[in-house]
Image (cartoon, rainbow, N blue to C red):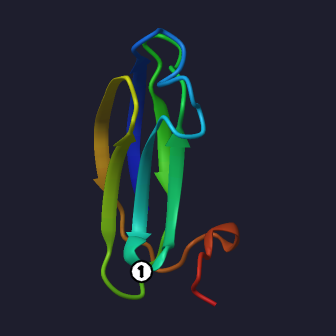
Amino acid sequence: MLEAEVLIEAGDGAFLGEMVDQDWFGISCGETTSYNHDFRLFGSQMVPGHAEKVRLYFVPTGHLTVDFRMNRANGKVTIKNLALHPQKSAPPWANHGTQ
């Protein structure tokens, strides 16, 4: 499980860009080259001073990759308390591609 606290401050105070489906920040954990991963995408600013705790569950069957990506986004992202916790199994709703 990848765990982090994420705080996003958008350039305009609301959204990371005019095209919210294209202007985003994302975190991904897993086998990203084979599209076998868990991820979270963010397109807007959070409540000022409030960081969101993100937990991505993934049990790798090969190499593990962690990816942070700003896609055409206008703003600043702060990541705190980043940790990787090995798991023997993922929750049933998080078994991405392991069946």
Location of residue 4 in the rendering, given as x and y in whole percent from the top left corner = 38, 43
The N terminus sits in image quarter = bottom left
What's the residue at 42%, 57% (across, down)?
28
Can residue 31 be seen here?
no
Q: Residue furthest right?
A: 93
Amino acid type shown at disc 1: Pro
Considering the numbered disc 1 on the image, is that residue within a helix, a strand or a loop? loop
Task: Tell me the crowding category of disc 1: few under 14, some 14 to 19, or many 20 or more residues within 10 angstroms, Cα based.
Answer: many
Location of residue 58 in the rendering, given as x and y in whole percent from the top left corner = 48, 70
Q: Is residue 51 left or right of residue 93?
A: left
State the residue position of label 1. Answer: 60
Q: Is residue 10 left or right of residue 21?
A: left
What's the residue at 57%, 86% (across, down)?
98
> Of residues 7 and 83, which is closer to you in this image?
7
Can residue 88 be seen here?
yes
* Number of callouts: 1
What's the residue at 41%, 63% (across, down)?
29
> Of residues 97 and 49, which is closer to you in this image?
97
Q: Is residue 29 left or right of residue 98?
A: left
What's the residue at 30%, 46% (across, down)?
82
The C terminus sits in image quarter = bottom right
Location of residue 39 in the rendering, given as x and y in whole percent from the top left corner = 51, 56
Residue 7's quadrant in the figure?
A: top left
Q: Is the residue 16 above or below the residue 66 in the image?
A: above
Location of residue 66 in the rendering, given as x and y in whole percent from the top left corner = 32, 61
